[in-house]
Image (cartoon, helix red, strand yellow):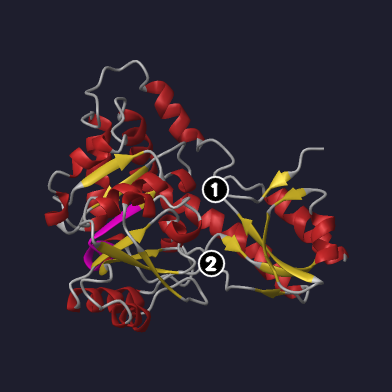
Amino acid sequence: MNKYSFLDDYSEGCHPDILKTLADTNMTQQTAYGGDEYSERARGLIRQHLGNDTTPIYFVSGGTLSNIIGISSVLKSHEAIISANSGHIVLHETGAIEATGHKIIQVPSADGKLTPDGVQSALDSNAHFPHMAKPRLVYISNATEAGTIYSKEELSSLSKICKKNNLLLLLDGARLCTALAADNNDLTLKDVCEFTDIFWIGGTKAGALIGEAIVIPNQDLAEDFAFHIKQRGGLLAKGRLLGIQFLCLFENKLFMELAKYSNAMANKLSSAIVDCGYSLAAKTDSNQVFPILPNTLIEKLQQSFDFYLWEKVDNQHSTIRLVTSWATDEVQVDSFIGIVKEI
């Protein structure tokens, strides 16, 4: 029997509207390397949300590439990144950032988020110059690796301490759409554009086949950015593939519709698990759920479902991670809940 997967939010292909548009436009001739009409229209739609019609936007294929290009292109060789110790660039990118020659200064975080105090602590403990790498960029993700999201006040506070200390602020937006669609979110894309120097909007985890949109509010950083994309192997000849997908996602706010559904399925799982008397390792803000369950129940669930064993809690309990998507089958959600209720 095939197991149903809650491993990630990109197990399926893409939303049918995107697939149809790709097929319908397949034989039209377009300018290569992102100069096509679909990419231009997609940039225009995104800029409407940003409130700035000149913000540079570049499309690349994946999240790790977005981080590599975004970070390495703006740092000198002796400059370092401040990140939560659970940050994606710390744990899940195979040392890709370190491979570019830049040190990552890790800050402990219980909920995946950085705070101004955490940034200040990293600055205070890495100031023996020139014998230590110089902090220059702060890396955050929204939603975080723990599924939590930043409020407008939190992002504004981080922006202020970065500006005060001449630090750049980069936001990894692999799951930015689910963060913006969260019930308790008070951020907009316009706010993100205001408070960060560079960020990217994830398409891969938001209903696209592949693709991320790198946005550069600090336009001083955009000089020669296309050269960095090309040098890192990120400039697709058939850039239309990426532009068409973001055009579909941002037409009629499809990206928000899909993200809200993804979050709703996560909330349904989370609420039912809590109602059954189990606790969560992190609050369910977006489309990631981190229940702490007895190992016996986990073994039972593993007979029908795939998910990550996230962390051992004790000899009898472990934290698992469940991720929902735009395509999550609610029947399978109900089946998962049913097994939890049985035990």
Decide whether residue 196 is among the magenta residues: yes
Please identify the quarter of the rendering in which residue 161 is found: bottom left
Q: Which quadrant is the N terminus positioned in?
A: top right
Kindly identify the amino acid type of the residue bearing the numbered disc 2: Ala
38 left or right, relative to 332? left
Circle count: 2
- Pointer 1: what residue? 326
Q: Is residue 107 above or below residue 16?
A: below
Seen from the viewer's position, the closer of residues 327 and 218 is 218
271 left or right, relative to 115? right
Seen from the viewer's position, the closer of residues 173 and 89 is 89
**Residue under the point 45% across and 60% down:** 90
**Residue under the point 27% across and 55% down:** 49
**Residue under the point 43% across and 38% down:** 210
Label 2, secondary structure: give it: loop
The magenta segment = 192-200
Decide whether residue 129 is among the magenta residues: no
Q: Is residue 234 above or below residue 76?
A: above
- Pointer 2: what residue? 146
What percent of the width, then of the height, locates residue 125?
33, 81
What percent of the width, then of the height, locates residue 235?
28, 33
Label number found at residue 316: none
Mark 1 packing: few (<14 Cα in 10 Å), some, or many (20+)?
many
Label 1, secondary structure: give it: loop
The Cα atoms of the two marked residues, 2 and 1, are separated by: 19 Å
197 left or right, relative to 148? left
